[in-house]
Image: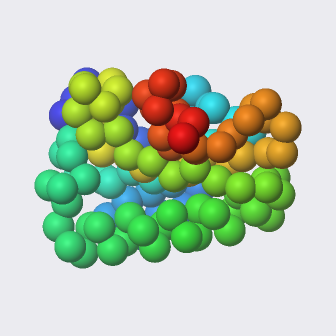
Amino acid sequence: MSDCIFCNPDSTDNLLENETCYARWSAFEVSEGHLLIVPFRHFEDYFEASKAEQQELWELVDKGKGLIESKYKPDGYNIGINIGQAAGQTIMHLHIHIIPRYNGDMVDPRGGVRGVIPDKQKY
């Protein structure tokens, strides 16, 4: 898709890549070291990925974590995928967020990804 920001990436921005996907820093980072794992092929939904693409996406998540560790030394991570507008997806090209977390970056981080619905974060 010619208007998709993740299609036709500038390869100089690609920190890691394999046959089906690449990793780059998020332009709208949640925290220092926020990395995106993006398939080269344009599709919106993780469940549209082939088994081979899914495997290579998760292999790059592992390598991306190593890259973040070596550069930023975070205390934890949130890993997430927004699928569909109801889940907050705004760029309709699949991408996986690896968000480093640091002690003290929130007063009370308990509930982690449950915070996507603030009233449900604490339990």
Looking at this view, is 9 or 110 the one in front?
Answer: 110
Q: Quick check: 86 above or below 103?
A: above
In the rendered image, the quadrant that contains the N terminus is top left
Q: Which of the 4 image quarters holds residue 20?
A: bottom left
Q: Which of the 4 image quarters holds residue 9?
A: top left
Looking at this view, is 86 or 119 the one in front?
Answer: 119
Q: Is residue 96 left or right of residue 69?
A: left
> Residue at point 51% right, 52% down?
79
The x and y percentages for residue 12 are 56, 47
> Residue at point 33% right, 54% down?
39
Q: Is residue 69 left or right of residue 20?
A: right
The x and y percentages for residue 32 are 74, 39
Q: Is residue 55 left or right of residue 48?
A: right
Looking at this view, is 14 or 26 the one in front?
Answer: 26
Does any portion of residue 19 appear in the rendered image?
no
> Residue at point 38% right, 64% down?
57
Q: Which of the 4 image quarters holds residue 33?
A: top right
> Residue at point 17% right, 67% down?
50
The x and y percentages for residue 13 are 56, 44
Given the current orientation, which residue lies at the most extreme front position? 123
Q: Quick check: 46 above or below 58?
A: above
